[in-house]
């Protein structure tokens, strides 16, 4: 596992659930992510984890542009290697974007997963009451 970076605010990272927030086939949470490098920088990586900032990170994209870049992608919340679980309950999906100098920004989405009725809802992380 990689150590948790200290966010520097560069690059900028904005993340949200797409569509109606429902889980797709095979436990995929649909995400819409926009990243933009700071002045004079180029983007490097976009990663996601459900196991917290100190957990294993899954690379969603390798980038090589200053941006902005908007990606429609997904994360499988059932993959234990990245902190996921097929069990019902609340998960926080952590995202981080880095630039070519190693600066990081982070974002988090809190979702509730019910495998019997696969739906997700999103609330601000500090007010998660799904």
Image (cartoon, rainbow, N blue to C red):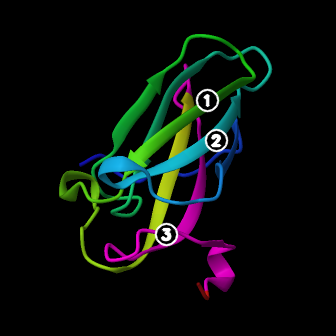
Residue drawn at (66%, 80%), measured in percent from left and top? 126
**Residue 44 in the figure: left or right of residue 82:** right
Q: Position of residue 90 (x, y in %)?
A: 43, 79
Residue 36 appears at what percent x and percent y?
Answer: 73, 28
Dot 3 corresponds to which residue? 119
At 46% from the left and 25% from the top, the residue drawn is 61
State which tag comes first along the sequence, 3 or 2. Answer: 2
Q: Which residue is mark 2?
A: 32
Q: How many angstroms separate mark 3 from mark 2 (CA)?
A: 17 Å
Which of the 4 image quadrants contains residue 11? top right
Rendered location of residue 25, percent (x, y): 36, 48
Q: Secondary structure at mark 2?
A: strand
Q: Which residues are magenta?
A: 99-128
What is the distance, in whole Å, between disc 1 and disc 3 at their CAs?
A: 22 Å
The residue carrying pointer 3 sits among few (fewer than 14), some (14 to 19) or many (20 or more) residues within 10 Å by Cα, namely some
Residue under label 1: 71
- Looking at the image, which is closer to me, 121 or 1? 121
Residue 127 sits above or below residue 2 on the image: below
């Amino acid at each position: 596992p990689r150590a948790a970076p200290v966010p520097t605010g560069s690059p900028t990272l904005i993340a949200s659930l797409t569509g109606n927030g429902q889980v797709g086939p095979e436990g995929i949470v649909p995400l819409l992510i926009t990243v933009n490098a700071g002045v004079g920088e180029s983007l490097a990586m976009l990663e996601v984890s459900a196991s917290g900032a100190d957990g294993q990170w899954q690379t969603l994209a390798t980038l090589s542009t200053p941006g902005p870049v908007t990606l429609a992608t997904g994360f499988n919340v059932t993959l234990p290697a990245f902190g996921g679980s097929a069990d019902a309950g609340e998960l926080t999906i952590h995202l981080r974007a880095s630039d070519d100098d190693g600066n990081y920004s982070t974002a988090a989405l809190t979702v509730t997963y019910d495998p019997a009725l696969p739906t997700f809802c999103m609330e601000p992380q500090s007010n998660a009451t799904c």
